[in-house]
Image: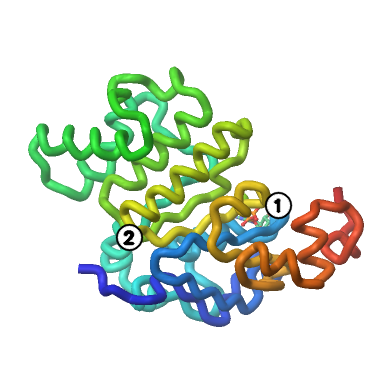
Amino acid sequence: MTPATQLPIETEDLTYLIGGEAILDGLDLRVRRGEIFAVMGRSGTGKTTLLRLIMGLVPPSSGRIRVNSVDITDLQERDLDELRKDMGMVFQSAALFDSMTVGENVAFALVEHRRLAASELATRVGECLHMVDMAGTEDLMPAQLSGGMRKRVGVARALALEPHIMLYDEPTAGLDPISAAASDELIRRLRDNVGVTSVIVSHDVQSLRRVSDRAALLHRGRFLAVGPIEELEAGSDPAIVQFLSGVHAGPLTEGDPHNS
Ligand SMILES: Nc1ncnc2c1ncn2[C@@H]1O[C@H](COP(=O)(O)OP(=O)(O)O)[C@@H](O)[C@H]1O
Ligand SMILES: [Mg+2]
């Protein structure tokens, strides 16, 4: 059903204003099929906003967004809904429903969008949990899980409808280094085994070095550079060097009144 487009996600001159201020200011993003693309940036640079735009949850102020080669900027809500099923979003907070079991959380979109017999539903939920190394946890409650496990369930839930695109909002935030490495490994495995195209927004440079094929640095609404992180590191752009090395003084914090 999904066209085998080479550019599952594309934005063209994408601009998003909040209160007259351009949070995103003419972004051109091209994510290739099957790649893991990282959008890096400091807190408040508009990373989550970019994911919300790609999901069609908010309309852009101007510019174009194409998902699977379909321009979503003039889609009806019903067609947008259809397209959204091909995108699994993993929210920063994992955002599980605390009153539902793990299994019910993972089943949520399936119950909503697919007419499945109870046994088929259980099978699919089991498969999704298996993919994130959480097999057999269907009857647990979210409160019984560690932060890393909750994130995994969030990934399993996003996988339920077999999307070709996965969007991850700060997947390693709040995780200890071991859980963060496991999360990176999971994201790569999903790409390798299922072939999903992934966008990760994060400021966790260490993780992005391991997991991303290409990365872009978002600063003041624009991408300062796009490419494999090793290439960005080898370059001489002082802003990129500052971000990747995490030093306080430099172009990224210039003229920033609360630059801590
Ligand atoms: N609903 C909103 N209303 C007002 N300002 C917002 C809203 N959502 C985001 N912002 C502002 O937009 C900027 C980008 O936010 P966000 O996309 O969440 O950044 P990031 O995810 O990179 O930390 C921030 O300055 C934030 O305060
Ligand atoms: Mg954010």
Ligand 1 has an atom within 8 Å of the beta carbon of the residue at disc 1: yes
Q: Considering only vertical position in the picture, is 212 above or below 207?
A: below
Residue 119: x %, y % from top left: 10, 33
Toward the viewer: 110 or 168?
168
Q: Amino acid at mark 2?
A: His
Category of crowding for the residue at label 1, using alpha-carbon neighbours closer than 10 angstroms: few (below 14), some (14–19), many (at least 20): few
Q: Measuring 17% from the left and 35% from the top, which residue is drawn there?
A: 123
Toward the viewer: 88 or 16?
88
Would residue 20 be seen by someone viewing this image from the given angle?
Answer: no
- Decide if residue 63 is on the left or right side of residue 86: right
Q: Secondary structure at mark 2?
A: loop
Q: What is the quadrant of the N terminus in the image?
A: bottom left
- Please name the residue that numbered disc 2 is placed on: 164
Task: Give the quadrant of residue 79.
Answer: bottom left
Q: Amino acid at mark 1?
A: Ser
Category of crowding for the residue at label 2, using alpha-carbon neighbours closer than 10 angstroms: few (below 14), some (14–19), many (at least 20): many
Q: Secondary structure at mark 1?
A: loop
- Please name the residue that numbered disc 1 is placed on: 43
- Decide if residue 54 is on the left or right side of residue 38: left
Q: Considering only vertical position in the picture, is 97 above or below 245?
A: above
Residue 55: x %, y % from top left: 43, 61
